[in-house]
Amino acid sequence: DEDGDYWLVDDLRSVAITRRGPVYSIPIADVLEQLGQVDLAVVYSVPAGPGVEGVDVVVGAVTLRPGAELTAADVTEAFAARGAQRPDVVQVLDAVPLTSWHRPKGRDLAAHGVPEPGPRVWHFDEVADCYEPST
């Protein structure tokens, strides 16, 4: 940073390689957790799929505080100034699997692949420059 200090951006195993370059999970989780509605956030990547080997999809999974609502507009606003350092998909879950010491288990979520479209799943639309519902 401007003081010459080094900051941990991510564990090498957690860096996603995307078409837009490397994407780091810790800063994305920090942005999601700063949303007042979010209780817990975990960021993970999954392979994009056949025909795009070596490219990852970055997914942000969140749980919400009791009674809170999160919209695609909220997520768009949170990542407006982040450029390439944003998730490709954001999903709201009822619960995130945790380790016995209460750390999110992103690998368990990643094993399910890219989230299926649904009412609480949004994808980033590069043309519209915003998050939109996945249908």
Image (spheres, rainbow, N blue to C red):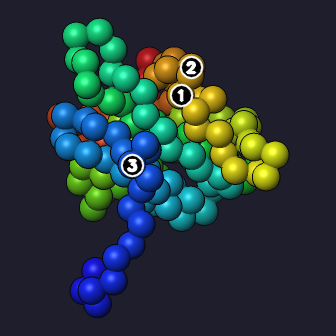
Pinpoint residue 126: horizontal percent, then vertical percent.
Answer: 21, 36
Task: Report whether 15 appears left or right of 113.
Answer: left
Q: Residue at x 79, y 52 (%)?
A: 101
Q: Residue 110 carries which label?
A: 1
The residue nearer to you, when weighing 40 against 73, is 40
Report the quarter where the C terminus lies: top left
Q: Are marks 3 and 1 in contact (CB under 8 Å)?
A: no
Q: Check disc 3 and report its element: helix, strand or loop.
A: helix
At label 1, counting other C-alpha atoms closer than 10 Å, the crowd grade (few under 14, some 14-19, many 20 or more) is some
Residue 82, by quadrant, is bottom left
Q: Label 3 amino acid? A: Leu
- Distance from Cα at disc 2 to Cα at disc 1: 5 Å
Disc 3 target residue: 12
The residue nearer to you, when weighing 90 against 15, is 15
Pinpoint residue 13: horizontal percent, then vertical percent.
Answer: 43, 43
Q: Check disc 1 and report its element: helix, strand or loop.
A: helix
Looking at the image, is mark 2 or mark 3 earlier in the sequence?
3
Q: Label 1 amino acid? A: Ala
- Distance from Cα at disc 3 to Cα at disc 1: 16 Å
Residue 72, by quadrant, is top left
Q: Which residue is drawn at 56% across and 22% down?
A: 111
Disc 2 target residue: 112
